[in-house]
Amino acid sequence: MADREASSQDKIVVAGFRHFFETADGPVQATDRVDLTIGAGEFVTLVGPSGCGKTTLLKAIAGFIRPSEGSILCDGAPVRGPGRERGVVFQELAILPWRTVRRNIGHGLEIARVPRAERERAVARLIELTGLTGFEDRYPHELSGGMRQRVAVARTWAADPEVILMDEPFAAVDAMTRLTLQEELVRLCATTRKTVFFITHSVDEAVFLGDRVLVMTKRPGRIKAVIDVPGRLAGRDWESFKVDAGMQAIAEQVLRLVREERGAAAPSAAAAGAEAPA
Amino acid sequence: MSATAAASAPARLPPSGLAVAWRQVRGLRILLPFLALVAAWWAIYASADFSPQVLVSPLAVWRAFVHLVTYGVMAEYASTSLRMIGFAAVLSLAAGVPLGFAVGVNRYAAHALEGFLRFLQGISGIAWLPLAIIWFGFTHTTTLVIVIYTLIVPIIFNTMIGVRAIPEAYTLALRSLGASRLRLVRDVYLPGALPSIVVGLRLGMGYGWRALIAAEMLVRQGGLGDLIFGARTFGQIDRIITGMIVIGCLYVVVDRLIVQPIENLTIARWGVLRQ
């Protein structure tokens, strides 16, 4: 899975990505020369302290922002804006409250003018895969937080993009639900393999889901370390993860790397929490 | 988890016959203040010997009403006013909603115009009457201009607010699904801003109706404002009061039977946006 020698297999290539934001106090540098490559079918997770520029990087790959410096390629072509080959799952609620579950999930296919029958088949399959059966005609406000995120994930998967970018998609749900959603994501990837770039601030989540884990430095963010996670993503579950010595060793290693950054970012614990997310 | 989601949907039982009857009795509450007003009016009228040039009895007003209705006068004046407010509402929506969108999607335009729109809200439509009469004369055009001006400002303002309240994630998510600008307007901006647009329409109809009556009193080209101002010339107190009551009733009818149901409909479906 972590086989990265064939460059023709590279889906996303980020080279020398630096980004600056204009603020009232002058420009703030969000990222510093980020280089990374994501292979086709790979599940890459990125973990780093809050405010390190993780979201900036994801938004640039999604095409929502233009890099101040550097290049971002998708299948060898420069990213010039958002496109349906790169789906995004956001942390906050991004499904439309005035559409039912079914119509939210089918929205991407509707935009792509996929014929109705075909659309309904794809939607039905994802409703089943994400455990939303019985809730097809509910509105988002009638669902729990975890189910809303299932709808968001299903909507992105249904549109069948080549790359899926996920920005802390499970950060806003409760801890127990999060474990379930993570395992469901593993199963979803097992049935429909996609290239996934997944941002998180949870070390366990990064190691549990990733074929490869990237650790980012504090702001301005750079890639500090790349850790390969052995074994196939398919079939991972939390119970075996917790007792797998190899996985636990990797998680500890990643935790050390992240904590170095936290320490470097803020000697006092209070300041770390005060940083605004990018 | 599925259990909690299911439980969050309120269960509605069909109302029993008794409950319906009770609700109808309670519904009569809204008539009580009106009955009190008529009673007080009658008491004042009966307490002294008023000249019919100053105050008449509710019965006289009722007779004037029946008279005006019988001879078709009331229908003539009322329909002029209703047509005018309806026409103005349609034109204001047609122009105000696109304008509100244009301003709302552009942060700089929204900032630049917010103060200006508030300034315009301060200058009531009636304050434009002198200029409008000079420019357009004592015509329906003058009335229409005043009413549209009054109606359109809250529509633009609320459309703008509605568009700006839509979370950025909605539009970003749709753009990453390949949505065009037109798609964004149809699938995100319009449904997202609709509850706010309807609020703007409702406010605008209230302001616009008042401005309409005032303009009709000065322009004197028909309408309920013309009816009551014309009656003043001949000291027809009964007609003046009849006209006032009809003005109030028509507003309530338009608001309750047309505007409010639209508002309830959008809030029932889209109100979740405001959670």
Image (spheres, coloured by chain):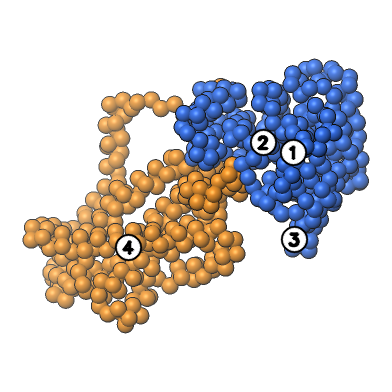
Chain colours: A blue, B orange
Q: Secondary structure at mark 2?
A: loop
Q: Position of residue B92 (x, y in %)?
A: 37, 62
Q: Nearer the viewer, residue B46 or B255?
A: B255
Q: Secondary structure at mark 3?
A: strand
Q: Position of residue A255 (x, y in %)?
A: 87, 33
Q: Which mark is residue B88?
A: 4
Q: Nearer the viewer, mark 1 or mark 4?
A: 1
- Kind of residue sitting beneath label 4: Ala
Q: Are marks 1 and 2 in contact (CB under 8 Å)?
A: yes
Looking at the image, which residue is at 26% across and 47% down? B31
Q: Is residue B78 above or below residue A167?
A: below
As measured in the structure, the alpha-carbon distance from the residue carrying label 1 to the one carrying label 3 is 30 Å
Mark toward the start of the polypeptide (1 vs 3) = 1
Q: Secondary structure at mark 4?
A: helix
Confirm whether circles 2 and 4 share one chain: no
Q: Nearer the viewer, residue B210 or A172?
A: A172
Residue B212: name its quadrant. Answer: bottom left
As measured in the structure, the alpha-carbon distance from the residue carrying label 3 to the one carrying label 2 is 32 Å
Residue under mark 4: which chain is it in? B
Looking at the image, which residue is at 57% across and 22% down? A128
- Kind of residue sitting beneath label 1: Lys
> What residue is disc 2 on?
A162
> What residue is disc 1 on?
A11
As measured in the structure, the alpha-carbon distance from the residue carrying label 1 to the one carrying label 2 is 9 Å
- Kind of residue sitting beneath label 3: Glu
Residue under mark 1: which chain is it in? A
